[in-house]
Image (cartoon, rainbow, N blue to C red):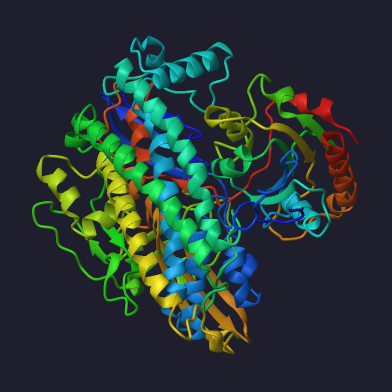
Amino acid sequence: MSGTSTPNATNSKGGDKVSPLKIVILGVGNLLLSDEGVGVHVANELVKLELPPGVTVVEGGTDGFRLINVITEADRLIVVDAVKGSGAPGSIYRFDINEVQNCPSGFKTSVHQIGILEVINLSGLIGKTPQTTVIGIEPESLEMGMELSPEVKAKIPRIIELIWDELKSSA
Amino acid sequence: MAKKITIHPVTRIEGHLTIEVEVDNGKVVDAWSSGTMARGFEAMLTGKDPRDAPYVTSRFCGVCYSVHQLASARALDAAFGAKVPWGGNLIRNLVMGAEYIYDHVLHFYQLSALDYIDIMAVAEYKGKDKDLLAVKDKIVNLVKEKDTYPLTPRYKPDDFSVKDPDIVTSAVSHYIKALKMHAKARNMGAIWGGRTPHYQNIVVGGVTSYPDINQWARFRTMLDEQKKFVEEVYIPDVLAFGTGPLWPLATMGVGGGHYNYLSYGDFPKDPAWKDTVFPAGTIVGLNPANIKVEPVNTEKITESVKYAWYKENKPVHPYDGEQVFNLDKKEAYTFVKAPRYDGKPMEVGPLARMLVAKNPTLIDLVKKGAKPGAVARHASRAIETKLMVDACYNWLDQLLAEMTKPGFKIHDTEHWNPPESGMGAGFHEAPRGALGHWIKIKNKKIANYQAVVPSTWNASPRCEKGVRGQYEESLIGAPVPDPENPNNVVRIIRSFDPCLACAIHIIDPKTNEIRKFLIE
């Protein structure tokens, strides 16, 4: 199974003789707030591609707590999201979740008081915590609108390349 | 001298909310509820194909997307003149049944329970239960690593907090179990919705894909497991806490408010909608000894913007509502409008539904002395979760019967194309309460769109007459003996299950540390 946006309803990985690592690429953000939705745009591009076995793409919208089913089913998780890191719009960041977990005030997603990174943290309480990498993109605009800004849109092919690199190094 | 306390932001909720209270002599004497994030997504819909609305509106909220999808599809059903076949309604019901289960369980354990227990009492657990000892180890380790978010930060436990190590440790073990059940329940909606989050199957006229027997059986097996948890863990926990350590809070009626309630009614049990799981009705000025329920007339709904950051307007019906911001308004303090029913502020949600239904379990608790307020809200949520679980079995039976009938239908395909012009309203009882969507169509495109969401009712500011919203009123009189630790304020607010997410998700670190991860 590959390249599907359906994490669970129809996507069964049972029966594989050599069960590969379950890799989930999770694109998150709000599609209605321009660059805030960059992760969703990336996920929607990825599902069009032929991906290696064991790789699932999930478009997570703005869910936090409620993505715990997706998170706990993954061995390796790649989160694509808008990140405010005070770089120039379109800047790309890459970090593993354990590199930031202990930063002084912790990570707080701005609205869901319990956000995606906290939920990944919590997933350890009920099972394994997947090895998680965040690929973040600095937004230009958070205005209402369903289109990305030109600066961020231009980076999509590069973000997809970077995700491929992650997949290669995970294989 | 009154002292002002501001809680900003209120944590463990879905969204951005600030609560300001004035405390005098250890009690709240005034309160202001402020939604600090602009929402006005409706404006984006103008000019779009009406059939896009269920998809776009499902992105209004990052948390309860399917509720908007359903309310929107129902508004379109009305505007298009579509008649949803019974098979389509059964599947819509089942999607929402799963939603109720995971939403309510999550709210009790993950979002609320920590208001009532002193989680650090786990360290004092001296019992021999292996599972509970494992829980103790986990929590103690997290504390050691200073990695306890979102279990912390918290206020200092007060007189009402449960501190008995056995009870607390057992509650924390259920917290963990509930998280597991939540992860499983999430997959139930996806069986019909095609994916999760943001289901794809609810559209004007019904649903998009025929169920097969494997999906049916899978849903039923998962439902069995959830039923067991709801009946054997969730309901006993709520009862044990509500009638045990929290009974004083329950009998004090902390968090009561205006005692006005509204339920649109929802979830048909039969094709003619003669009977629904939740009846429709309004109650004004509740008298628990003699509950008077009046029918709902949605023409009586208006929204006041006097204290909200929108262009001044007299109170108008949602069909005529608009979203023009005015951030310079002196008296304004929130982005939330003030919906009123017949001019009155109403509470919506589980307590409203169970009172309108005169639910015997809740009425029994009320007769024993529980006053409608924060604790009764938790009880109502548990009671109605069980009602939805039972209803799901009934819907599954009916769906199986429908599936075997020749000409089984799930969609009114005759009414797929938008009308030249029209209008329609869609109502739904979302887990958090009464949700309404209103659409006007001109030249086959959306001319105006408005949503009045449950938290708008509950978190509303004062109206043009200066009458407080339900959160605000429910805080009046709440005991706050220690202004540094206003436990009762957050207990009351979280008992409503606030959802003001509507919806943004950016990762916004508070330090500049992230710069070192810049790769290009």
Point out residue B132 in the picture as x, y percentages from the top left corner.
40, 20
Point out residue A115 in the picture as x, y percentages from the top left corner.
59, 37
The C terminus of chain B lies in quadrant: top right
The N terminus of chain B lies in quadrant: top left
Point out residue A22 in the picture as x, y percentages from the top left corner.
71, 41
Q: Is residue B315 visible?
A: no
Whether residue B514 is situated above or below residue A144 in the rendered picture: above
Whether residue B486 is situated above or below residue B326 in the rendered picture: above
Q: Quadrant of residue B464?
A: bottom left
Whether residue B430 is situated above or below residue B86 in the rendered picture: above
How many numbered marks appear?
Answer: 0
Q: Is residue B207 visible?
A: yes
Image-based side of B323 in relation to A131, left or right: left
The residue depicted at 53 percent of the width and 14 percent of the height is B141
Q: Quadrant of residue B493?
A: top left
In this rendered view, identify the residue nearer to me: A9 or B387. A9
The residue depicted at 48 percent of the width and 74 percent of the height is B75
Whether residue B410 is situated above or below residue A74 in the rendered picture: below
Image-based side of A80 in relation to B378, left or right: right
The residue depicted at 88 percent of the width and 49 percent of the height is A155
In this rendered view, identify the residue nearer to me: B189 or B309. B189
The residue depicted at 55 percent of the width and 11 percent of the height is B144
Check the image and name the residue furthest to the front: A17
Point out residue A51 in the picture as x, y percentages from the top left corner.
82, 51
Image-based side of A44 in relation to B345, left or right: right
